[in-house]
Image (cartoon, rainbow, N blue to C red):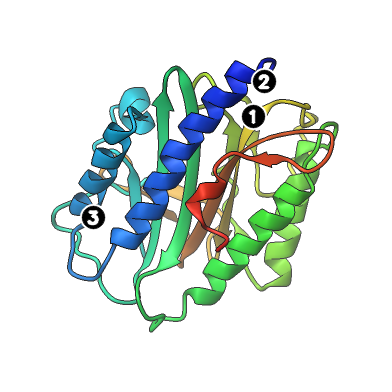
């Protein structure tokens, strides 16, 4: 959507606060020994307390309030009572929601407890690439050039990107124009970022795979060549200068 009034801006900000605070509190709540279902139900309670509704449930009838992906899972992990978190796990939590007709989306990967498996560098690289990508977005910039930046920075660090998972427009629904803000230079995408538009920018930085394949449960995505993926995401408003980061309260850069 394009923000044209202060009411719209406030609406996006309130929805963004709900998903950002939920993500931050879920990360703090996560600990070895709990199931991803327990973590997800905590997130659902937080959203409800703020009057927000889970976007994946509303949009896709997803079997969880949030997406929680662990280790080799790249995205859209289904919360389960049988999936118990362990020390050193690479965990991704993606929280999106609707509040009073406005939608926001954010996510972040982190290492649970001590980094005994060495995922920390991947996580930090994903964070910093997101920071650099967002700092280069303003009205008129080619969407494909941000994709080029993300992939170039990933390669510099010895990683690659997942090409079939992308950022997207957001605001009055979960996915809006532009529908694909890819993590690589898509030469067929001639679109440009538009001033005052709301978009969810996300990185998918990978150790081995370039495509995410759907698994047997019909939801969970894993890399086509294995390995691990770190994702970080903010909902922002494009301006003529530095973007407004609506989901800054999630603390993924702290």
Q: Secondary structure at mark 2?
A: loop
What residue is disc 2 on? Answer: 3
Frontmost of labels 2 and 1 is 2
What residue is disc 3 on? Answer: 36
Q: Is residue 26 found left or right of 147 in the rendered image?
A: left
The location of residue 173, given as percent across then percent down, is: 49, 21
Q: Is residue 39 found left or right of 206 in the rendered image?
A: left
Q: Residue furthest bottom?
A: 116
Q: Quadrant of residue 47?
A: top left
Would residue 156 be seen by someone viewing this image from the given angle? yes
Q: CA distance from mark 1 to mark 3?
A: 30 Å
Q: CA distance from mark 2 to mark 1?
A: 7 Å
Frontmost of labels 2 and 3 is 2
Quadrant of the image containing the N terminus:
top right
Q: Residue furthest left?
A: 81
Query: Local crowd at mark 1 within 10 Å, few (<14), some, or many (≥20)?
Result: many
What residue is disc 1 on? Answer: 198
Would residue 104 be seen by someone viewing this image from the given angle? no
Looking at the picture, does residue 130 appear above or below residue 60?
A: below
Frontmost of labels 1 and 3 is 1
Query: At x 59% / y 33%, what residue is drawn?
Result: 168
Q: CA distance from mark 2 to mark 3?
A: 36 Å
Q: Is residue 6 found left or right of 20 in the rendered image?
A: right
Query: At x 41% / y 56%, what residue is drawn?
Result: 92
Q: Secondary structure at mark 1?
A: strand
Q: Secondary structure at mark 3?
A: helix
């Amino acid at each position: 959507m394009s923000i044209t009034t202060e009411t719209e801006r406030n609406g996006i900000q309130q929805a963004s606060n709900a998903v950002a605070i939920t993500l931050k509190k879920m990360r703090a709540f996560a600990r070895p020994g709990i199931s991803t279902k327990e973590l997800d139900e905590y997130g659902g309670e937080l959203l409800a307390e703020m009057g927000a509704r889970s976007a994946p449930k509303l949009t896709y009838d997803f079997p969880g309030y949030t997406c929680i992906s662990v280790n080799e899972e790249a995205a859209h992990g289904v919360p389960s009572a049988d999936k118990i978190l362990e020390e050193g796990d690479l965990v991704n939590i993606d929280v999106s929601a609707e509040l009073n007709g406005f939608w926001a989306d954010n996510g972040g990967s982190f290492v649970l407890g001590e980094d005994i498996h060495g995922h920390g560098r991947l996580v930090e690289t994903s964070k910093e690439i997101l920071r650099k990508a967002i700092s280069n977005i303003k009205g008129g910039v080619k969407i494909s050039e941000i994709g080029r930046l993300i992939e170039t920075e990933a390669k510099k660090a010895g990683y690659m990107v997942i090409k079939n998972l992308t950022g997207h427009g957001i605001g009055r629904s979960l996915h809006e124009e532009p529908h694909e803000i890819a993590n690589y230079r898509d030469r067929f995408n001639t679109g440009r970022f538009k001033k005052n538009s709301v978009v969810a920018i996300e990185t998918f930085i990978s150790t081995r795979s370039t495509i995410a394949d759907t698994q047997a449960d019909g939801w969970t995505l894993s890399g086509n060549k294995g390995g691990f993926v770190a994702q970080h995401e903010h909902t922002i408003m494009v301006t003529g200068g530095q973007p407004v980061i609506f989901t800054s309260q999630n603390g993924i850069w702290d």
